[in-house]
Amino acid sequence: MKFNTFVTSREDIQACAATRSLEEVLIEPRELGREGRVSKERAVELASYAVECGLKPVLVWDILMTQGEFKAKCELVASMNLENFDAIRTQDPGAAVWVRERLPQKKLQFVVENSNHNVPGLQRWVRDLAPERLVLSTQLPEEKLIACCRELSTQCEILGAGKILLFYSKRQLLRSNFSSGEELADVKWIYADSMSEESASRPFPTIENEHGTFMYLNKDHFILDKLANLDAGGMHTVRIDMRDLREEGHSAAGIKELCEKVLSNDNELGESWPRPTSAPFFKRNRTDKQFSRMKPQTRLLRDNSCLGEVVSVERGEAIALYALQDFSADNATFTFISHDGQTVDARIESFMDLAGNPIGSCQAQSVVVSPWVKGVKPGAILVRAEKSQVREIPA
C-alpha cells in the first residue's frame, strides 16, 4: 500500500520525497482544482521539481463545470506543459472523456467518491475510460472496499485521513451574508462555520472560493489506524489530506512523521491528527437502518377507525387536527398513534374550531383544535381509545 497527499510548495515536495511508501503527490492549480491554491504556472514548476525529487506528480482537475466552463478549462489544460505530470485526476465525466481522447498518453485517475457506490457501476467506468485508478467513496464500508479492490481491474484509492465533503454547490453562498460587497471585492476565499437550529452545537466548516461553496463534516475522516485489512485486500493508495491543517503556503508539513507512525503501527497514531475524527461508514454503513424508523406505522391504521390526523402542535397550548370523517367530540376518550407506533391516550372534553369556538362534533375535511396533549407529535392519527385508563385533558 502506498500513500499520496497534496502539495503546494517545494518544502512539501521535499517532505514527501523523504517519506517511506509515498511516491505520488497531488498538485492543484487554482483554475482546475476545487481547493487549488497555486497558479497553473506554479503547478508546472512544482511538477518539475517533484520529478527531480523522484516523485510522480498528478495534475488535479476535479472541479465540476458547465458547458461554457468546460470548453475554457479544456483549452487551459491543452495549453499547459504536461510533460512532467504522470497522471491527470478528474471528477467530471466530461473531463475524463476529454483526457482519454485528447491525451491518450496520460494516465487517468477518475474520482467516483460522490457518484458510484456499487461494483457494476465502477466496472462500467473502468471499461469505458480505462483509468489507471478509481478514487473510491468514504461511504463504502471496509468489506465493500476490499470487494472493489478484488473485482476491479484497476488501482483503487481511498481517503485515509482528511475532510469529509457533505455539500457542494457551484454557487457562492457565503458572500450574501456580509453587509458590504466592497469589503469582499479582493477576497478569494471565505472560511465560515455553518449551523442551524438543529445543529447549533455542531457547526460545519464551510469554504467558499471561485469554484463554489463547500461544507464539510465537523469531524475528519480517519482510518489510518485501520489499514491492515485494506492492505491485505489490495488497496493500492491511501490519500492523506492535510490541507487547512498546516501553516499557509504548505499542505504536507509533518507528512513524514505521520506516515512513519502509520507504518510502525504507533499506538498514539490517532492522537497525531489535530482535529476531531470519525469513520462513520468504515466498519458498517448502517444508514439504511433508519428506513424502518422513518416508515410510518400509521399507514396500516388509515381505515374507518381513523378519525383525524395531527397537522400541528403548539407545545403547552393546542393541537390542530384534520378531520378525516365526522365524529362526536363531546367528552370522549381518544388514542393518538404516532408514526413509529407509540400511543398516547387522553380524554378530551371538547374541541374548538379555528376561531376558538367550542364545537360538539367535528366535520370531515375540516381543521379542528384540541387542548395540548403531552407526547403527541405532528403526523399522529386520532382513533377512539380502547383502553379504560386514559388521562383527562381539560378543555
Image (cartoon, rainbow, N blue to C red):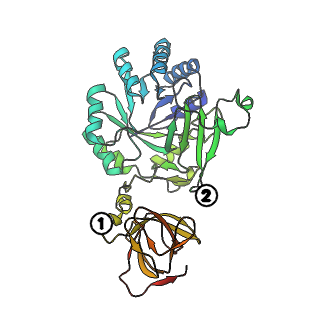
* Residue 25's disc number: none
Instruction: Compute the Cα span from label 2 to label 1.
Output: 37 Å
Secondary element under disc 1, as helix, strand or loop, is helix
* In this picture, residue 326 sits left or right of residue 211: left
Work out whether residue 247 can be spotted: no
Secondary element under disc 2, as helix, strand or loop, is loop
Q: Quadrant of the N terminus?
A: top left
Q: Residue at x 27, y 41 (%)?
A: 119
Residue 215 at x, y percent in the picture: 55, 42
Work out whether residue 145 can be spotted: yes
**Label 2 packing within 10 angstroms: few (<14), some (14-19), many (20+):** few
Q: Which callout, 2 or 1, points to the residue nearer the camera?
A: 1
Residue at numbered disc 2? 201
The amino acid beneath tag 2 is: Ser
Which residue is nearer to you in this view: 96 or 251?
96
Instruction: Give residue 283's quadrant in the image.
Output: bottom left
Q: Indicate whether 298 appears above or below 46.
A: below
Which residue is nearer to you in this view: 286 or 80?
286
* In this picture, residue 210 sits left or right of residue 300: right
* Mark 2 or mark 1, earlier in chain: 2
The amino acid beneath tag 1 is: Leu
* In this picture, residue 68 sits left or right of residue 339: right
Q: Indicate whether 270 appears above or below 205.
A: below
Residue 8 at x, y percent in the picture: 58, 29
Residue at numbered disc 1? 300
Q: Indicate whether 287 appears above or below 173.
A: below
Which residue is nearer to you in this view: 247 or 93?
93
Q: Residue at x 59, y 25 (%)?
A: 38
Residue 314 at x, y percent in the picture: 56, 66
Direction top: furthest residue: 79
